[in-house]
Amino acid sequence: MKQYATSNRKFSTWFPLFLVFILVYTSGCMTLEENPVSGNRRAFGYTWQQELQIGAQADQEIVAQYGIYDDDELTAYINELSELILAESHMRREDTSPQFREAEFTFRVLNSDIVNAFALPGGYVYFTRGLLSHMNNEAQLAVVIGHEIGHVAARHASQRVLQQQAGQLLLIGGAIAGQELFGMSAENILNIGGTTAQLLFLSYSRDAERESDRLGVEYTAMAGFDASEGAAFFRTLQRLSERAGGSLPNHLSSHPDPGDREQSMHQLSQQWRDQGYEQTRRNERQYMEMIDGMVLGQNPREGFVENNIFYHPDLEFQYPVPAGWNVQNMAAQVAMFDNDQQGVSIFSFARDASSARAAVEQFTNQEGINVVSSGNANLNNNTGYRAIATATNQDGSELRFMVQGVEFGGQVYRFINYSSSGRYDQYESSFTQIVEGFRRLTDSSKLSIQPVRIQVITADRTGSFQSFLPSDMPMGMNPEELAIINQLNLNDTVTRGQRIKIPVQ
């Protein structure tokens, strides 16, 4: 959770703490338009102008929801590399219609440790710092850039919207447990529009993913980068999926298997070599220099959990986490839920609320919310206001809420705690524990904590990768994770002069 005065902050996580499905109905109308990749006209769910408008609106919501990684030099570097790949794409070719050729692309680095990249209609492409930390050279990133540009060029999202009249779309990373159980929509939970939610959680078909793989290799090879390096990244994805439980996460089930994609990278790359594209650029040194010093893993300055307490050093507060509950920490909200996903607590900035009472009433004044009781409820010398309320779910069942506002540090915050009315008594003590435990953080060791960062070193000797790791691992790090980040095994030999990524805190 990051500090925002008046704004709230996906994407998608490839290995989230939990996975929740919601039902989203698409409403795109069929339109016959050009496919920039094939040059042919075909049916799409949106016109190109609609894609541009949707992308621009969704971009604002994604930036607010996730936050941008604050590194101007890295941002400029990613933009420059992405423009090189874009220049070779179908979006910039002479025989492509001007409306596509002249479309501006936006490339962003999101402040998330999740390993992911994604694109939205109209030319908005996102990479997480978690993704960047798992790559070793520009060629690997170029393949991913090309893959995402391929989704935009082939207009896959617009194709999928047309095909997907209704179905279960995976809500990843940004949501909290309970939508399906309690009927709360993604828009309400994430503070994002319905169209953005649909696009973020839209899964492409395997054919679309394979097409983007082919396009990614094509654009990368034409730019002179070694497209076969993409295989190393898919090998990394395979290892990450194995650590997550031995198989691909559910929301990647529509993707081709990483092992198959690893092989196809070599084959596709060779096809372009056979056509005369040498593909000599890897640029390991430049890439490693650029990610040197980048935050690795979760940034504790933006909130972390230790011994069942959520601490936020930058905002200087803390509150309890009930035993056994899971925590999802995002830029402008923290969601907690029990293992049964029946009790939920959401802590966030109360946008546009001038007081604790206003923060509560922003929620309880919504249509369909019935206030049972309300009144002042200060929290450890901080002005507070609390309401108990109910609402009827779409299936006729009733939800019960404990809504708490609190004024602290010049900000107004809000807890929304809820469960089904039938189980509320079971969770009331946990909800009370959470809100009444909110207080100022005074522990200097927590206030001064710093994030783990990547330190790129040049090996001064030959030895096993494990022999280069620190004896005391930094916060949240373990040797196997670091081996994966370096695309090595713990017992692999590192030769003198080889660059490796080591964590420092």
Image (spheres, rainbow, N blue to C red):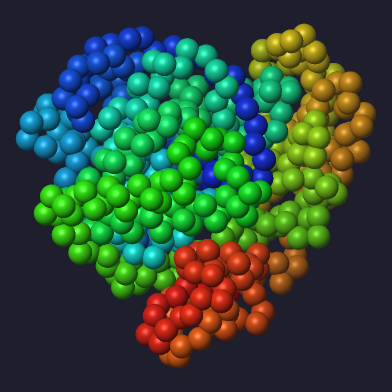
Image coordinates for residue 71, horizontal then vertical, percent: 39, 60
Image coordinates for residue 406, horizontal then vertical, percent: 73, 41
- Count of marks, rendered view: 0
Residue nearest the observer in this picture, 418 or 358: 418
Q: Give left or right: position of 436 versus 35.
A: right
Would you place residue 260 above or below residue 139 in this image?
above
Residue nearest the observer in this picture, 53 or 501: 501
Which quadrant of the figure has residue 309? bottom right
Q: Is residue 412 visible?
A: no
Image coordinates for residue 188, horizontal then vertical, percent: 60, 25
Q: Quadrant of the C terminus?
A: bottom right
Q: Give left or right: position of 4 versus 393.
A: left
Image coordinates for residue 294, horizontal then vertical, percent: 45, 65
Residue at position x 22%, y 45% from top?
218
Residue at position x 89%, y 21% from top?
422
Would you place residue 366 above or below residue 404 in this image?
above
Residue at position x 31%, y 73% from top?
285
Residue at position x 87%, y 44% from top?
433
Q: Is residue 36 visible?
A: yes
Which quadrant of the figure has residue 419? top right
- Find the residue positioned furthest to the bottom: 461
Residue nearest the observer in this picture, 76 or 375: 76
Q: Give left or right: position of 238 versus 424.
A: left
